[in-house]
Image (cartoon, rainbow, N blue to C red):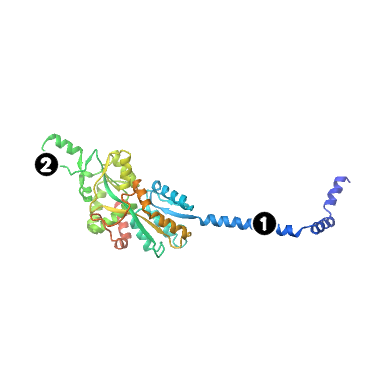
């Protein structure tokens, strides 16, 4: 047998291995062993502590405010506090409805800490469903508004004259329609195929339609909705699309939000907003803390931060809001939210029947 095989056999001799073990134990330093254990425990605890700290130094927000406006504000909060913000934004097509439904679905196992809403109806709905914490659950700040937007190449901001004296004035009036004085005028044949609006089941368009139902009464409102649908409007996925259609002249007039009009005007589009009336709606931003939020301390910090005056002013400067403060207005709609929410399901069903044919 070769020397190599002899060495291999010796290395696997169980008696020799046992002797080696006892020699190792006899020369083992117990203090070294204790030190190694202590270092290992310290490293493990440190790693656990780091993971726990990282988990605690974050906050989760569901934001209905447009990402282009919300993201810079949230980054500034991160810089000031060191708290990492994990944001979930909505899509323009379904707007706040999608986030509201998600919060309702997660009510028994909250994944979110703070809700940043961009209109009041869905926030009020979530509050009645106990989605927010019981005390100081939500607040409103700043506002924008629902407006009529016109293409200034086709629509005059003034009503067209009722009597025309010359052929030249007649041709001008045919080319440039006078602006409507009321939303009810949009059902006139002059606006057939020339009106654009987002689907009225979602976002601020939904809130506006629900508030108009309360203002006019169900029968009058239903008649107007049916006549508007029959007048062949453009129904599109979002208020910014309304502005684009009006600016291109595909539609001459639209129902949209003031921030989308402001963005279009900054881009040099030929559009203008008509003045506020009793049919207009102020739409505040809202901020709320979720009941049993996973990170309640950080949620409170973000809740307070978004209500700061300088935050609202930055949103005004960005044209995301019209005004930094929100309060009563002498001319616009003043919905009774409790009553409106009681009719929410019925009104939504009626809108589906009329506009989703």
Q: Which residue lies furthest to the bottom in this view?
A: 134
Q: Which of marks 2 and 1 is nearer the N terminus?
A: 1
- Residue 210 lies, in percent from the top left, at 29, 56
- Residue 73 lies, in percent from the top left, at 41, 49
- Residue 198 lies, in percent from the top left, at 32, 48
| Left or right of residue 67: residue 257 | left
**Residue 308 found in image quarter:** bottom left
**Mark number for residue 163?**
2
- Residue 306 lies, in percent from the top left, at 39, 54
**Residue 137 found in image quarter:** bottom left
Residue indicated by mark 1: 39
| Left or right of residue 54: residue 94 | left
SS class, disc 1: helix
SS class, disc 2: loop
Q: How many labels does the image show?
A: 2
| Left or right of residue 134: residue 326 | left
């Amino acid at each position: 047998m070769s020397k190599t095989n002899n060495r291999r056999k010796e290395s696997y001799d169980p008696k020799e291995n046992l002797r080696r073990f006892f020699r190792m134990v006899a020369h083992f330093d117990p203090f070294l062993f204790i030190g190694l254990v202590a270092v290992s425990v310290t490293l493990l605890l440190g790693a656990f502590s780091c993971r726990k700290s990282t988990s605690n130094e974050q906050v989760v927000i569901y934001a209905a405010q447009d990402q282009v406006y919300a993201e810079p504000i949230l980054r500034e909060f991160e810089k000031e506090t060191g708290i990492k913000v994990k944001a979930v934004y909505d899509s323009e097509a379904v707007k706040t409805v999608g986030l509201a439904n998600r919060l309702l679905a997660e009510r028994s196992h909250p994944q979110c800490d703070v809700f940043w809403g961009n209109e009041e109806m869905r926030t009020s709905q979530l509050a009645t469903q106990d989605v927010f914490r019981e005390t100081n659950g939500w607040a409103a700040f700043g506002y924008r508004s629902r407006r009529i937007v016109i293409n200034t190449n086709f629509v005059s901001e003034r009503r067209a004259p009722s009597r025309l004296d010359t052929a030249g004035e007649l041709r001008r009036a045919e080319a440039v329609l006078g602006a409507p004085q009321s939303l009810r005028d949009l059902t006139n044949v002059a606006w057939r195929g020339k009106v654009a609006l987002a689907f009225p089941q979602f976002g601020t368009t939904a809130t506006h339609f629900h508030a108009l139902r309360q203002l006019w009464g169900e029968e009058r409102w239903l008649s107007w909705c049916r006549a508007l649908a029959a007048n062949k409007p453009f129904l599109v996925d979002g208020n910014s699309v309304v502005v684009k259609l009006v600016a291109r002249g595909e539609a001459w007039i639209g129902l949209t939000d003031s921030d989308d009009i402001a963005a279009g005007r900054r881009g040099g589009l030929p559009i203008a907003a008509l003045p506020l009336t009793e049919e207009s709606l102020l739409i505040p931003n809202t901020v709320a803390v979720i009941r049993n939020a996973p990170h309640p301390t950080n949620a409170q910090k973000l809740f307070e931060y978004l209500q700061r005056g300088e935050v609202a002013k930055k949103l005004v400067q960005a044209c995301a809001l019209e005004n930094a403060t929100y309060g009563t207005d002498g001319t616009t709609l003043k919905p009774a939210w409790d009553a409106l929410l009681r009719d929410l399901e019925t009104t939504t069903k009626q809108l589906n029947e009329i506009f989703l044919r």
